[in-house]
Image (cartoon, grey):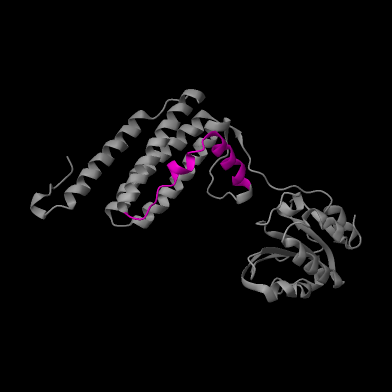
Amino acid sequence: MISDLDLDRLAGIVHLPQHRRLLTVVAELWRDRTTRAIWLGGSLARGAGDRWSDVDLRVAVEDARFSPDVMPSGAHHLAADSVGSHTLRFDEHAVLFHILLADGEIYDLLVQTASHPPTNEARLVLGCRDDALGERLLYGYDPVLHVAPADGAVIRQVIVDFWISQQKHQKVLARGLPLIAWEGEHRMRQELVRLWYVLATGEDPGPLGRTTIHTLAPVVRAVQERDTGALARIGRPLRDIAELVTAAADTADEVARVGRELATGLGFDYPEALEATVRQSWRWFGEFQVLWTRPTDERSSSPP
């Protein structure tokens, strides 16, 4: 356990721009004897940080001095340089101050009581005045994206859900709600990335909607290594209804291609009838949209 402040432990990030301010902030926090421990989390703690890394700074204070509404006095440099922040209260024992500073650095300053178990993450302990807390800080690891061998039944259901969602696109477009279609397309593209990852690795990362940069990065790297053109196929603009329709068709074509390849590899029946129904409906929808732009006397009352 590190009973006194050891700033030499930051030598691994001395080449990064975050280093200089961090030295000052940590030293100020440590001067307050009610500070019981200081450590880093995140990529800087793992030795994997770069100039774009947030500073995940953690501080434990005496229980009686903890306040969820006020940053420790030693963090006044952060408060002075802040141009925007928000506060996340986890419970009555811990609070996170998410702070954007004037030079673009981001600090995630977690403040907790000394008696509260620390967040489970990789840690670089810089100082600790509390033996019991020091023992808790010895071991920690970052959360990872849990993947498992892809299950054919699960992946087939992902594809089924995609085609059903694709059908719903027509409803919101016909009702003049393209922003809802934009959101739907975004979600369906996430499912396409999931399918690409399964194709690249044989493993399923599960739904990607709530992943972080840290947990999503290995998924994206695996996809990009297998297919350098993935971004071009998934990145069509969505600025108006015509572009939404085109992008939806491209996403559908790619899901159809990848889905059939996965069906062969994982041994499930591809939902051919479902895809055919949705595609036919989109053809009707497209023809109806064209007719709708013509003069009234030229319109058909219904799609063919």
> What residue range appears in magenta?
215-240
What's the magenta bit mostly, secondary-structure-wise? helix
> Which image quarter is the N terminus in?
bottom right
Q: Is residue 117 visible?
A: no
Which of 89/50 is in front? 50
Residue 123: % across, % down: 78, 53
Residue for point 55% across, 32% down = 200
Residue for point 81% across, 48% down = 139
The quadrant in which residue 60 appears is bottom right
Residue for point 78% across, 49% down = 140
Asked whether, in this view, residue 100 is left or right of residue 25, the answer is left
Residue at the left extreme of this rendering? 297
Residue 169: % across, % down: 34, 48
> Which image quarter is the C terminus in?
top left
Residue 36: % across, % down: 85, 65
As for residue 222 lying within the magenta part, the answer is: yes
Asked whether, in this view, residue 271 is left or right of residue 175, the answer is right
Residue at the front extreme of this rendering? 15
Above or below, 173 against 191 in this view is below
Residue for point 43% across, 36% down = 159
As for residue 224 lying within the magenta part, the answer is: yes
Which of 15/145 is in front? 15
Label total for image = 0
Asked whether, in this view, residue 163 is left or right of residue 217, the answer is left
Residue 264: % across, % down: 47, 23
Q: Is residue 241 visible?
A: yes
